Image: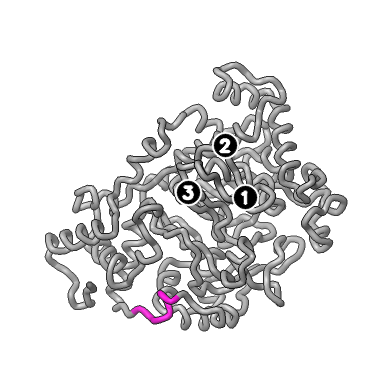
Amino acid sequence: MSYAADDRDTDKVGIDRRLAAALVRAGFTGRIESRLEARLGRPIDPARADLGRLLFFDKILGLHEDNSCAGCHSPAFGFGDSQRMAIGVDNNGVVGPNRRGPRNQRRSPLVANTIFYPALMWTPRFVALSGDPFDPSLGFKFPPPENLVTGVPTLLSAQGSLPSTELVEMAGFTGITANPGPFGARHFQFDNGLGQTLPAPDETGFHNFPIQAMVDARLNAIPAYLEKFGAVFNGGVPLSPGGITIHMRRLAIAEFQTTLTAADAPLDRFARGETRAMTSGQKRGALLFFEKARCVTCHAVAGPSNEMFSDFRPHRIGGPQVAPVFGVGTGDTIFDGPGENEDFGFEQTEGDPALRYTFRTAPLRNLKVAPGFFHNGAFATLEAAIGHHLDVQSSLREYDSATNALPADLFAGPFEGILAAGIDPKLRKPIRLSEDEFRDLVEFVRDGLFDARVLAFCNRLPQSVPSGLPLQAFEGCQ
């Protein structure tokens, strides 16, 4: 059932009843956050979470010593990216709009609510094989060399240590000329001697496990961390050097990230019976989302979606290609395609050409603080991102860098390959909305799914970290 533009409901009781019924049909309860500790099987550990917070902001986890987890996941942006496309190592020490440095490949996603995600990252590279991020029974699927990760309780804890091993994110390229591993000679230009030298690859051919060992060694050399890890994992007794392990790091960082839950938006409160929690425009937009515009088909809420507004599956939705120029100071990831200006998406993870140009459906909570949209920040506004879904082929063909305020160091790539591969059947036909309907839909996604506690995330910023390394400058938190 759908409602036309001239059927904009002025009967508050009527629209409330229709929306409540739509939420029941979709499987949305507004109670996902209240179930968190039951899903974990225990209360959140404040001491463990605080240790994870310090690690999250400490550049000691990166061999290059110029980026922390928070460098790409800023508290001023919902612990998401402050950039349209991420900037990792060799940055200028700023986290915010004035951050500068070579681009990576995609936009860093929001960390808030990721404890509920059954699949992480845009491709997605990290997956709970059970379909439940709280169920470790089947293990967690990762790319090589990690492959199958076991022995940790949640998908988020399995993933927590991985950024340290990513050269473009935190490890850097110092020493890669002598120890290239899977990287080719074109990356030698980034070997700038800063930070700590990369270890040689191990028998897997990758740097990952040797890097993890070096990070653990760095932490074990800091008395303050031996004390803090001991307080959490050793009954309050400081650990001896060598006692800090990757397993402890994973659990601590994941515990902090678990505290970044923000799933009490107006729609959640409405679903729990607070009919005044939403504006009339948000309610009309919600009805469009769940019915006429069919957004919930992919931005799902039921079952494994955990009310996060994503089916967490790959789809080819025709997002415009955006890429930097590969080279020192501009971009440190070699993109796909003959012009090295395409992103093949999920094909990179699975090796299946049928998955080319597909990406995981983006969760929609708390997008109000995002500086850009889609996996590569192609769109500057939520209006443009939603508008793309309504007429994908026209939007893709007509994409304009200037109109979308694309940063000067990013360039639009070709669209022909995407169209040839085929847009997802759900989006092949344009969806017709009136101007009023479109405005209501945007209001719902922007404000109806926004938890205002996100605006207070800067209070998680520590004054200092145990390594003694200086914090980055977090714009918007001063």
Mark 1 or mark 3, whichever is nearer to me:
3
Residue located beneath label 2 in the image: 151
Q: Is residue 73 left or right of residue 224?
A: left
Query: Residue 280 in the image: x percent, y percent?
Result: 22, 62
Q: Can residue 478 be seen in this snapshot?
A: no
Q: Nearer the viewer, residue 20 or 126?
A: 126
Residue located beneath label 3 in the image: 130
Looking at the image, tell me whether mark 1 or mark 3 is earlier in sequence order: 1
Residue type (three-letter) at the residue carrying disc 2 = Gly
Circles 3 and 2 in contact, beta carbons < 8 Å:
no
* Label 1: which secondary element: strand
Tell me which segment is drawn in magenta.
425-431
Residue type (three-letter) at the residue carrying disc 3 = Ser
Residue type (three-letter) at the residue carrying disc 1 = Val
Query: Residue 34 in the image: x percent, y percent?
Result: 33, 40
**Magenta-colored stretch includes residue 429:** yes
Looking at the image, tell me whether mark 2 or mark 1 is earlier in sequence order: 1
Q: Residue at x 34, y 40 (%)?
A: 35
Q: Is residue 112 left or right of residue 142?
A: left
Q: Nearer the viewer, residue 375 or 337?
A: 337
* Label 3: which secondary element: loop
Q: Is disc 3 surrounded by few (<14), some (14 to 19) or many (20+) residues within 10 Å? A: some
Query: Residue 223 in the image: x percent, y percent?
Result: 68, 23
Query: Residue 92 in the image: x percent, y percent?
Result: 68, 52
Mark 2 or mark 1, whichever is nearer to me:
2
Residue located beneath label 1 in the image: 94
Q: Nearer the viewer, residue 331 or 476?
A: 331
Q: Residue at x 81, y 63 (%)?
A: 186
